[in-house]
Image: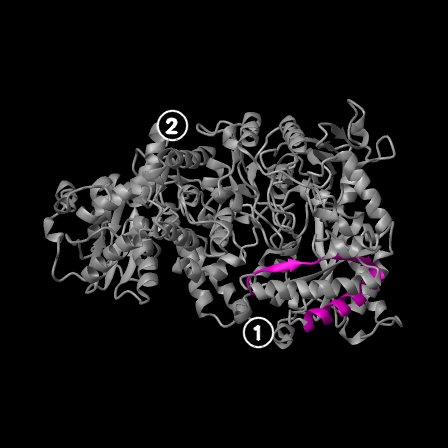
Amino acid sequence: MERLKELKTDIYRCIHCKACLFAYSGEPSRKGVGEHKGTFGKEGVLYEGMLRSCPAQIEYGWEAYSNAGKVWIARAVLEGEIELDENVAEVIYPCITCGLCEEQCENDVRTVDIIEALRAAVLEAGVPARDKHDLVDGITKKEDNPYGGKKVDRMNWVEEAGIDPKILNKKDAKIAYFVGCTAAYRQKNIAGATVKLLQKVGLDITVLTEEVCCGSPFFRVGKTETAKRLMNDNLALFSNYDMVLFSCAGCYRTLTIDYPKWTGEKNTFKTMHAMELIANLVSEGKIEFKEHKDLVGKTVTYHDPCHTGRHFAEHFKHELIAESDNLFMDKRKLNKKVEDWFEVPRTIIRALPGITFNEMYRIKQDSFCCGAGGGVRAQYPEFSLNTASRRLDEAEAVKADIMLTECPFCWRNLSDANDRDNHGIPVYGILELIDTYDLIKGAKATPKKK
Amino acid sequence: MTHYNNIEKRDIEYFESIVGKQYVSDNPAIRASYLAKSVMGLESQIAEVIIRPRYTEEVRKILVWCSTRKIPVSPISGGLSGGFGCALIKPGGVQLDLSRMNRIIEIDEDSRYAVIEPGVTAGELWAYMEKYHPAFCPPIADGAPPAATVMGDAIDRGFSLYTSSVGPQGDNFMGGEVCLPTGDIIKLGSWALHGVKPFYKWGLGPELFSMFMGSQGAMGVFTKGVVKIYPHPEHKTIKAWAMSNPYDMQNLTLELGKLEFGIAHNTVMVQGGNWPLIMTRWPKDKVPAEYDFYKKIGVPEWWMNWEIWAQTAEEQAFVEKTIDKYANDFKKNPKCKDPEAIKEWKLHPKQIASRLKKPNKIAIPYSYYEAGFLFITWYTPWNECADFCVEYNKILKKYDFPEVMWVASIERCRQAICMPIVCFDSSKPEDFQRVQDMNRESSEMCLKHGWINYRPDPYVHAPMMYSQAGMYLKYLRKVKEMFDPNYIMHPGRLMLP
């Protein structure tokens, strides 16, 4: 409840305008791709102007499932108008915490923080956790990952990918690759592809066998004690490295944004997504790509993971707000930084020869979520996959043959929805695609953090 | 005092049988999610049950049941037309969420109307017409968020993007279908005759529609509405002139407003205000509080914008030139108080683009200054709007609120819509009291001048205003009894029981 109280000013800034329900709520005349009747959404969606895009509100319909509804529930809780009980839990957990709402808010209400704080308050009040969240919590307490893989097996992918095991716990490396649980236990292809690519560009990296879950699932669902324990273990483990690299959007967001927020201190290491590093090399002309016959003529599209996309855009904004004495003048600087940030994956994709890149209608800050995050995939699998399938419908609307992303969790959910609903759009991580099709023509130098 | 019954299990079972179990909820969290204590009212309460009908017949059956059972019903159209539509203001009863009734039924380009259901939002109708009827656009509320519903704004007689040219949103209303607690469904305008197009708002005459305008759900439930649509010409711009005081703003604007059958019809939106309108869109501790800063970046003390729509570039240029000529001539007018301060405010193309954007989120960030705001809106004859600004700002200052004033022309400066924006911290109970104390004092002042409150709140404006209109209230109640004999519709609103 304390954290919810800390967010009181944010909560009371909400005027219930409901702009948060829509992508492009500030661009009513935005030109789109017209109406498309999707494989999943057969009734069709008009991809023009502002577009209803809160996944939970689309799925459940009720006001309470939307961000505005949840913020007013939080306010009613603070004012003692309703109890923190199962009724509240029922409506606040089916939310992917994608942050689309936060992006639309003209009053800069920190909606994701409010939802997470409300979840934590519900658990503090004695409401039982959602059963799948409890299950995952129990597994993680034992094995330090939510998938139930054995601790000792966490780095098995190294050998399976044919990578020299000397990469493990290298004494002299200054850069560590944080693999994350999804890539370590499930999407091992992502982990292998990332390391191979980093090695190919000449980077001396290590992977630490004692790495534990980043804690993201537990921060998201309000299980903050578990999250903090994992955070402290990772902070101790990585404290002597100059830089930590990531292939997982969720891990990257958690170590970069959540850890300093919860410790109140800056991390001792820099963080960077592998995608940023590769994009920098592309921009500097130090990597060139080549065609692959199987990809020539294909149309790809890119799904912005919420955790590497607008969660960072919002992070930049709130950093700026905290530092600024005159927000009226300073906020103008933000747009360029955010625009540059969203160009990172696009820099790589545009450099891939022989491929057509078609953007979906909802992109960047206004991207539509894949449906996996916020504890939703575990607890509400149907809602989760329906959301992913709505996203794939949007990819169909721009005639995509392949959907790219850069998050193993997005990858998993989008791939599962693709299989379930037969969209016929395979999903790849950008780096995975590069590795799978051996697209690097030449790499000239070891990159440095910009 | 009307006695109402609480919701019982049998009521919920009946509602579920009508709309389906999944569209009825008495979950306290779901009920609380409909609260909205901001923008146009601070009185929002939690309903006993929320129902989300899809069809007119479902609405009709619910109303009949509730009327028989004496259960209050407060409808909301689903979006936000200044404070979440018709938020419940008395505890208990049914909140009828009409957001599932969101069909765009017909667009007639020749007779120039759109038939819509109550849940159609301004942004969605705008996008739909841009795609399928690009030569026309709907009368959406300017300044209200894109999630505001077109119907909500029409019933409120709100401010549309054409209001300065053609009148308030109520004037754009061409007819509708209303469900009554008696079980009857009335069609308004020429729709009253079966099979007739809704082309003539005055219908069979006398026309009943005005009984439902401004009623905010207190008479019945609109299940369909017909609003005028207008051409959407290619040539648009904003012309702005600066001045140092509201009297020069008022009198220059009136000169131009009187150019009827001329450029006044091209100026679809004529709105202005004072420099705190800019300041209070930012957090109080993160922007300069003194005018000097805003002066340096080119913000005038007072200003007026004319949004110009024209069919040709020549027509647009003529309107711009005429505004400039009248502004320059006004400096020599004996009514002009400060000729030196009258200057064109040359807007950056981005500022023009931002102001032309429809619908927009321009009214939302006033909550950012502290944590909450209230629009308290009054209608005055146009030539009294400057007095309003001066008198109201004195009261805002007395109660330690920033003096934020927005003024717009209605129907070519026949009337003014004057809207002080009261920025306060809604997380502090004492600030609510401060707002209400200020509201009472300013309402007394306004009524003494003969100014009318638009959308009167039930605790301050309505009692003060209706107490001065006894005979009117007597007949308003009789009308209410005719449509809603058991007084179940939106109780307390409009000082009706």
The amino acid type, in three-letter code, at marker 1 is: Pro
The amino acid type, in three-letter code, at marker 2 is: Asp
Query: Label 2 belongs to which residue?
Result: A421
> Within the image, what quadrant is residue B448 found in?
bottom right
Q: Is residue A321 above or below residue A37?
A: below
Residues tagged by mark 2 and mark 1 found on one chain of the structure: no
Tell me where residue B429 appears, x and y as whole percent: 56, 63
* Quadrant where the image shows the N terminus of chain B: top right
Query: In which chain is the residue bearing label 1?
Result: B
Query: In which chain is the residue bearing label 2?
Result: A
Give the structural element (helix, strand or loop) at label 1: loop
Q: Residue at x 84, y 60 (%)?
A: B450
Stretch in magenta: B370-398
Q: Is residue A77 magenta?
A: no
Query: Label 1 belongs to which residue?
Result: B288
Badge 2 density bin: few <14, some 14–19, many ≥20, Cα 10 Å: some
Q: Residue at x 33, y 29 (%)?
A: A419
Tell me where residue B453 appears, x and y as whole percent: 76, 55
Left/right of residue A166 with respect to residue A445 in the rendered view:
left
Give the structural element (helix, strand or loop) at label 2: helix
